[in-house]
Amino acid sequence: MRLLVVNGMTGTFISVFVTSAVLYMNIGNLGYLISTADDPVLPVLMLGFGLFVTLGSVVIGSAIMLVGEKEDDAGSGPGLKQRLTPQNLQLEPVLVPARAPERR
């Protein structure tokens, strides 16, 4: 549970930062549109919630996927015990039967 809570809070802080940056830098003219809206709270909440769900899921998902990684295995790829090199890679041709389509 601690893993999920810590990474969920990290995703929340990142989404708050991104929402603030989008509004402050007026990306896509969103800052102006929201500041001139009759009720600016709803668009800000919708933007923030969408980013919260997206970025929170990314942070939690990446933390879950890295649970089994050891620090000495970092960079070797997920689940790879040895590097694939031309010396240890054995390729064999496989015969695949093919039929011609029937003509009508």
Image (spheres, grey):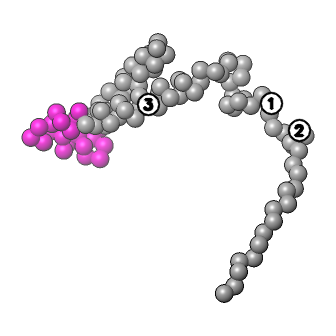
How far apart marks 1 and 2 lie (CA) works out to 9 Å
Decide if residue 27 is on the left or right side of residue 66: left
Decide if residue 30 is on the left or right side of residue 39: right
Labels 3 and 1: the sequence-earlier one: 3
Residue pushed farthest right?
87
* Residue 37 shows up from this direction: yes
Write down the region rendered in magenta. Answer: 25-45
Is residue 35 shown in magenta?
yes
The foreground one among 61 and 85 is 61
SS at mark 2?
loop
Q: Please state which amino acid type lies under the numbered disc 2.
A: Asn
Q: Residue at x 46, y 14 (%)?
A: 1
Q: Are marks 1 and 2 in contact (CB under 8 Å)?
A: yes
Decide if residue 49 is on the left or right side of residue 93: left
Q: Are marks 3 and 2 in contact (CB under 8 Å)?
A: no
**Where is mark 1, residue-wise?**
82
Is residue 101 shown in magenta?
no
Q: Residue at x 49, y 16 (%)?
A: 3
Q: Please state which amino acid type lies under the numbered disc 1.
A: Gln
Q: Position of residue 44 (x, y in %)?
A: 22, 35
**Where is mark 2, residue-wise?**
88
Q: Are marks 3 and 1 in contact (CB under 8 Å)?
A: no
SS at mark 1?
loop
The quadrant where residue 75 appears: top right
SS at mark 3?
helix
Decide if residue 29 is on the left or right side of residue 91: left
The quadrant where residue 42 appears: top left
